[in-house]
Amino acid sequence: MALPFDIRPHAEPVSAAERAGRMADPGFGRVFTDHMAVIRWSEAAGWHDPHVTARAPLQMDPASSVLHYAQEIFEGMKAYRLADGGTALFRPTANARRFRDSARRMAMPELPEALFVEAVERLVAIDRDWVPAAGVDGSLYLRPFQIASEVFLGVKPSTEYLFMVIASTVGGYWKGGARAISTWVSRDYSRAAPGGTGAAKCGGNYAASLVAQQQAIARGCDQVVFLDAVERRWVEELGGMNLFFVFDDGSIATPPLTGTILPGITRDSLLTLARDQGLVVREEPYAIDRWRADAVSGRLAEAFACGTAAVVTTIGEVVDGDDRFTVGGGVEGPVTTALRAALVAIQRGAAPDPHGWLHRLA
Ligand SMILES: Cc1ncc(COP(=O)(O)O)c(C=O)c1O
């Protein structure tokens, strides 16, 4: 099924001087490009009307189903400027596959992976000038998403959907630059439960996590750590990043994908790179009490969080109620540094790509 994209360039794109000004210190998720990609779905026509057009506000009926029942999914991925001047995506088919998995969980139609990737490619191609130069920390963050657009207040899967991709020039994720972060262990709130939507990238998961994140901030921490919802004992993930633990015997571990955490593409890539580096890798449950005991004894040498937006971020301190402990003296350790370096080198085209992860744009 070939669905040709209709490319409708912006009549008045941002000038080069204005764009350079906005890209100078973009922060995260506030500077947007000139265009957006759109594909529609209806029961009668299936996927249709793929196009790229000027980025503009949506007109929505206030009874649109997504506004009431949150039938919505999204992805997060990046386009990088390479050392040789080219542009590339990192493992876009992995995002396309996860998007389909999320759609299935939310009773939404699954966008074919090729169409997902083409929509992203077309948007990056037309907004290529918004991808920061090689050698700086920045990238073009891409946000594909799909919303239920049927105008109906009944609780049921929508009969119409809108798939879109928008793009945002981003610098580093952390205000004030990368550093070791502190995490707050949420004992009051769960992110996901067995049978729930934890493994899907749906907006509702994030809405539900915000109050716990607010608590973390109120306690002086950067991020919240969620525990499993059943025993409230097993460490799962942060609000938007997966977790890794590095032990003094040279092994690393990360919580297994049991359906309540997001299967991160950074997580999967780091597992592979760690094996490439000769580390012993385990996907196994890790209890919060063990985390504390291992950090105190020194058996746990490093801990870090990972995801597309913040890449690899050291966890230096953990606060659990009135108790607090540091990991690895509160500073980044060598295994974390080496894994980040290996990942970033592939993403930026500065190292060989033995796993075929880099998806160069023509
Ligand atoms: C809840 C959650 N966990 C983990 C991740 C990391 O996933 P990825 O590495 O694919 O960005 C994200 C980010 O998208 C997330 O939102």
Image (spheres, grey):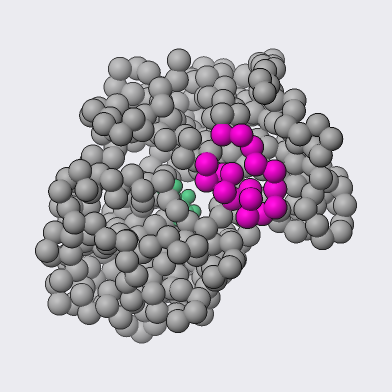
Residue 168 is one of the magenta-drawn residues: no
Q: Position of residue 330 (x, y in %)?
A: 22, 65
Residue occupying image coordinates x 42% and y 63%? 237
Q: Position of residue 193 (x, y in %)?
A: 54, 71
30 relative position to 250: left or right: right
Say which quarter of the image contains residue 288.
Answer: bottom left
State which quarter of the image contains the N terminus.
top right
Residue occupying image coordinates x 75% and y 59%? 69
Name the residue at the front extreme: 1
Q: Which residues are magenta?
A: 97-113
Foreground residue, 51 or 186? 51
Q: Position of residue 110 (x, y in %)?
A: 65, 41
Residue occupying image coordinates x 49% and y 20%? 128
Name the residue at the bottom extreme: 322
State which quarter of the image contains the C terminus.
top left
Residue occupying image coordinates x 62% and y 19%? 13
Say which quarter of the image contains residue 317.
Answer: bottom left
Foreground residue, 201 or 31? 201
Foreground residue, 4 or 56? 4
**Residue 19 appears in the figure:** no
Name the residue at the left extreme: 249
Q: Position of residue 355 (x, y in %)?
A: 30, 34
174 relative position to 142: left or right: left
**Residue 66 appears in the figure:** yes
Residue 102 is one of the magenta-drawn residues: yes
